[in-house]
Image: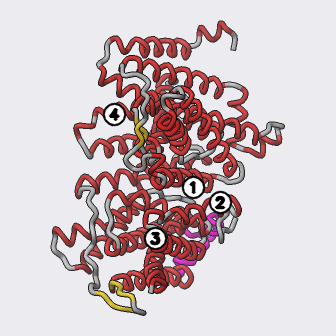
Amino acid sequence: MLFWQILIDGFAISALYALGATGFTLIFGVSGVLNLSHGAIMVGAAVAAWAAAGLLHVDAYVAALIGIAVGMALAFATYFITVRPIQQSRRIAEPEREIFILTATLLWGIIIQELVAYLYTNNAKTVLPIVEGVVTVLGVRTPTNEFFTAAVCWVVIGLLWLLVNRTRRGKAVLAASMNARGVTLLGIELSGIYLTVWAVYGLLAGIAGILLGMFLGVSSYSVGPLTASAFSIVVLGGLGSVSGSLIAAYVVGYLETITAYMLSPAYRTIPALLLLIVVMYVRPQGLFGRR
Amino acid sequence: MSVRAVFTSRLFWIGVATLVVGALLPLFASGYVLGLLTVACYTAVFAMSWDLLFGFAGEVNFGPTFLIGLGAYTAGILDARLSPHVSMWLCVAAGAAAAVVGGVLLALPALRLRGPYFGLTTLVAVLMLQNFVVVFAGLTGGEIGLSVPDVMSVDAHVNYWIAFGFMALSGAILFGLSRSAVGLILQASGQDAVQAGALGFNVVKHKLAAFIVSAFFSGLAGALMVFYMGTASVGTFVDISVGVQVIIAAVLGGRRTVIGAAIGAIFLIGTGELLRPLGEMATLIVSVIALLVILFFPDGFLGILRGGARS
């Protein structure tokens, strides 16, 4: 009974982690940017969906679409306000750009977080779920929404795989992550590729944020932990490796779920952090990293 | 630098003027302002220690609060347990020592990992410390905080003088270190470790020293601040947002300057307080200012000053 419960709950939460981390690792793989406003973008999208449902009284589907649109808008804003000016700045030396982008996206995330808190308070918000009700599977009563979440996550990840491996644009993105200079030599605009990647990222982060809002609820306090968990999943799997992130998301998701059920919810994040430290010492490039 | 050159340099006289103004301030300022400045002085030491690691050794430490928190909590816990028998200052020394041990622990991965990987290790270190404080609530006071029986002084003037003197002394040591041969070697190792090694400098030894010095001052400042506040809590010493503030202070003031970090810290604390009537908006406005400075004046306040002096 408990075994099945852990299996089902862990599967859903891990799928959500995987979706959240995929966009994060995609951006790093293609443009070398670690976006520390990740959590804020997820929360922004979820809160937009919540506000749309509550204030405009639209139905759950329209609210979710509005949330996704806001997620994409926030992703583009992150790129144009913080990342691009630093990448093109002549006054910041090449080796220092990384820390500047980290600091700037961190500040940008705080700005979004504070705006959300100012406009809609710090209270936790639960987005109206698209599917309601409870089903009993293998003797475990589970909200239907949990299965819906896992299904959507995997469909979106599957679509992303198709986009990257089967379309012309996607192949260009993949090539840029391997060798950016080579792609420009083939006559493809790198800036266009960055735009594509940030659009896809906004879409993924938006969907992940809204699903999280339906599943667990979000508040402006979840910004930091969300960024930290995406960051640690991505590093655990190996920076830039999408399949590594997917596996790492499941490792972290199940570790957390098992700890929460078997020991205490208070210790939830500790084993995953310990694992991360061990991996950093023994295998710094992550479980599936390329370097 | 000859003695004569020291006395004729502009920097020296600006420093002396700042010291005199800072030391005489309690004669004019109210207790409220002094309390604010006391916190600002400790934050300035946090930021300067961070700048030594980042600006000079080139190590992106996302977890300054790991070192600060170790110092603060070690001192606080020891004092809470052994209060009447052991002097407060011994607890402060133990706090600084614990932070140095933490600094060496942090340095171990730093010597192996690069850039974002090391940054994450430091972040994880902070999260671990935070979990530890919450889980062992019996020892650490948990989320409520740990109150210590001893306080430094109940007089705002004395507290301020201790904090200001401590900041001036640490600032002088860290600044001197950054301008010395050691500082230059550190800077070289931070920019290109392989080349610095090829020139015959022991990169590992210098980086380790930078971690130890940075940890020592962070831990000491954290421990002293506990006895100023009379309480240690996650929100003031360990939380990631505190570390973020330290980093923003250092980058805002101008990285790789040490002094800039102190200016940034005082600015941040001061502005945060001035904007307090705006409530939720305060953090928002400070973040927007910091983002604008980083985007348009990457060399921070000192960079703006220097640019102005040059043209």
Task: Indicate the colouring scheme.
Answer: secondary structure
Q: Is residue B11 above or below residue A228?
A: above
Q: Is residue B175 above or below residue B126?
A: above
Answer yes or no: are tags 2 and 1 on the same subunit: no
Q: Earlier in the sequence, mark 3 or mark 2?
A: 3
Residue under the point 44% across and 52% down = A82
Q: Picture coordinates of residue B257 (x, y %)? A: 56, 30
Residue under the point 42% across and 28% down = B228
Q: Is residue B298 visible?
A: no
Residue A143 belongs to magenta span: no
> Which stretch appears magenta?
A167-188
The reply to whether the C-beta atoms of the residues labelled 1 and 3 are less than 8 Å apart is: no
Choose between B238 and B266: the one closer to the eye. B238
- State the CA–CA distance, disc 2 to disc 1: 9 Å
| Residue that numbered label 1 is attached to | B120
Mark drawn on residue A260:
3
Mark drawn on residue A280:
2
- State the CA–CA distance, disc 3 to disc 4: 41 Å
Q: Amino acid at mark 3?
A: Ala
Mark drawn on residue B271:
4
Choose between B59 and B205: the one closer to the eye. B205
Label 4 residue SS: helix
Mark 4 Cα shell of 10 Å, populated few (<14), some (14-19), many (≥20): some
- State the CA–CA distance, disc 1 to disc 3: 24 Å
Mark drawn on residue A93:
none
Choose between B204 and B193: the one closer to the eye. B204
Residue A186 belongs to magenta span: yes
The reply to whether the C-beta atoms of the residues labelled 3 and 2 are less than 8 Å apart is: no
